[in-house]
Image (cartoon, grey):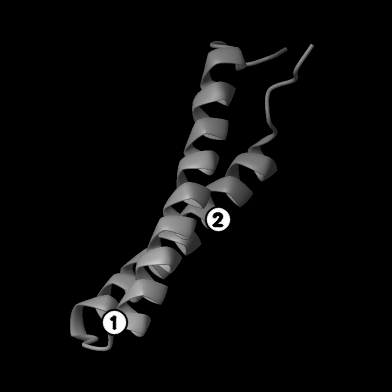
Amino acid sequence: MVQPMTAKELEYIADSMSNEDLLIKQAAATLAVSTTPAIRNYFSQVIQTHQQHYDSLLHAISHHQQIAPTQPQQ
């Protein structure tokens, strides 16, 4: 049986999601000002990669919500 995540694990995932979001925003800002096709292509791939990471972390949080207890544990 899969156990719910601890508060520390949830904090780590939330921090990781914030980091991935920042990387996406930074890559998007660079993409917006780039005119070189190779650089634009690279940063498009960077955005896609970090979006996949973010989505995976979001999935982990969603899965946790499905198995987490709804009442505090005694």
Given the image, on which type of amino acid does mark 2 rest?
A: Ser
Q: Quadrant of residue 22?
A: bottom left
Residue lying at 36% horizontally and 83% vertically, measured from the top left: 39
Q: Which mark is residue 23?
A: none
Residue located beneath label 1 in the image? 37
Cα–Cα span, label 2 and label 1: 30 Å
Q: Quadrant of residue 8?
A: top right
Measured along the vertical axis of the image, is residue 20 above or below residue 71?
Answer: below
Give left or right: position of 8 versus 60: right
Residue lying at 28% horizontally and 82% vertically, measured from the top left: 37
Q: How many marks?
A: 2
Measured along the vertical axis of the image, is residue 24 above or below residue 31?
Answer: above
Asked if the residue under mark 1 is in contact with the one under mark 2, i.e. CB atoms within 8 Å, the reply is no
Q: Nearer the viewer, residue 6 or 26?
A: 26
The nearer-to-camera label among 2 and 1 is: 1
Mark 2, secondary structure of its residue: helix
Given the image, on which type of amino acid does mark 1 rest?
A: Pro
Residue located beneath label 2 in the image? 16
